[in-house]
Image: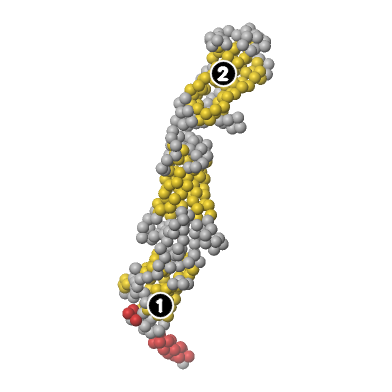
Amino acid sequence: MRHFLCLTLLALLSSVFVGVAYGAVSLDKGTYTWTDKVHIRITEHGLDSDRTSVKIYTSNHQLNNYKLSKAGNGLYVGEITLTGFLHDVDGDGRLDTNPRTMGTGSNNGFLESQRDDELKISIRFGDGDTITKSAKIRWNVGTIDFDMPRYPIDETSSVQVTDPDLNLNPQTLDRIKISISSDSDKAGILINAIETAKESGIFNATISFVQDSASSGDRLFAVPGDSIYARYEDRTLPSLHSVSGDLKIEDSAEVYSPILSTERMKNSAIFFSDSNDNPLQSFSPDTAMQIVGTITNEQKFMQKFVYLIQIIDDDNYIESISWIQGEMLSVQSMNVSTSLTPKKSGEYRIETFIWKSLTDPTALSLPMSEMITVE
């Protein structure tokens, strides 16, 4: 008897719910930015869609009686574009947005929004039932990134900005300006980064490096050992910041030469001359001589250097150290000399070095060494 009553109750409940209409609304995102395109899907079953009203609204603006398109059995779709509010996005003193609220559906709707806002959709069906859906509207802190931490000087560099707030027009590819500089050119260049796809909010730019000319266009003057910097100013910041606030977003990388450090300059063998520049073949105590070395910049760009000459006697005592520092043009050669007046007979070792600087003894060439006998 109890089993019979349970079956009867289940049958009655089933008869109540069969044929009852229901609907569901879904959005393509849980959180939008202020100029996003919003894609709407509504499923309804057993209801007359012609008697269904759709209201889409933010805190201060709304679209009433918005019409959706039928996309299948019980499926209706539509889209609206958020248009934000008046704001200077790039800091050039001009407003970059066109806020407006207009349109009746299903793909021509525009709706204004604030930085911290909420998008709501209310669907009232013909039988009086209502369902709602909401999503947040927020600004974001952007990022900028080089695609590698280090670049060979003869290759290109890619920079990517990710900032959904800069997708100002979902119908086209947006562009933004980013600043690229190096240790050797602190002013740098200003280049365009282009959105990778409509609505992506991701922007890419490519630069190359030059050493024989000034920075120009998308070419940046940089030499091996430089750090390079990518920057842009984010003026669409979350509510922890003021609406008019800005934040410098940056990243850095390094450039290097694929040429070995010790092959960047040529350190030629030294030769000896008297005070009249006549070559010397023999050496005597208390007789002045000139020690002359020849160095060459083997690279296609200017190179800073320090050239050192060290003189060591046969007691392994450093008789003298002299140096010259400067900067050489591409493929430039020069003679560098120092004087020596030996005080005693014996063996002397002459060593020459080319370093980056006195504080950075990275060798730009293999050292040279020459022995002479003073008698």
Q: Residue at x 54, y 25 (%)?
A: 366
Residue 46 seen in render: no
- Is 91 or 364 nearer to us in this picture? 91
Check residue 337 in the rendering and tell me which mark sits there, or answer none.
2
- Local SS, label 2: strand
The amino acid sitting under disc 2 is: Ser
Q: Position of residue 29 (x, y in %)?
A: 44, 66
Instruction: Classify 328 as above or below 293.
Output: below
Q: Residue at x 50, y 21 (%)?
A: 334
* Residue topped by disc 1: 123
Check residue 279 in the rendering and tell me which mark sits there, or answer none.
none
Q: Quadrant of residue 208?
A: top left
Q: Residue furthest bottom?
A: 1
Residue 286 seen in render: yes
> As drawn, is 288 to the left or to the right of 219?
right
> As drawn, is 62 to the left or to the right of 371?
left
Q: Residue at x 67, y 10 (%)?
A: 344
Within 10 Å of disc 1 (Cα), the crowding (few <14, some 14-19, many 20+) is many
- Is 245 or 330 nearer to us in this picture? 245
Q: Position of residue 269 (x, y in %)?
A: 52, 18
Looking at the rendered image, the disc whose residue lies closer to the viewer, 2 or 1, is 2
- Is 227 or 127 nearer to us in this picture? 227
How many numbered discs sit on the rendered protein?
Answer: 2
Of the image marks 2 and 1, the number of the one nearer the N terminus: 1
Q: Measure how far apart labels 2 and 1 are at the Cα level.
A: 90 Å
- Local SS, label 1: strand
Within 10 Å of disc 2 (Cα), the crowding (few <14, some 14-19, many 20+) is many
Q: Quadrant of residue 309?
A: top right
The amino acid sitting under disc 1 is: Ile
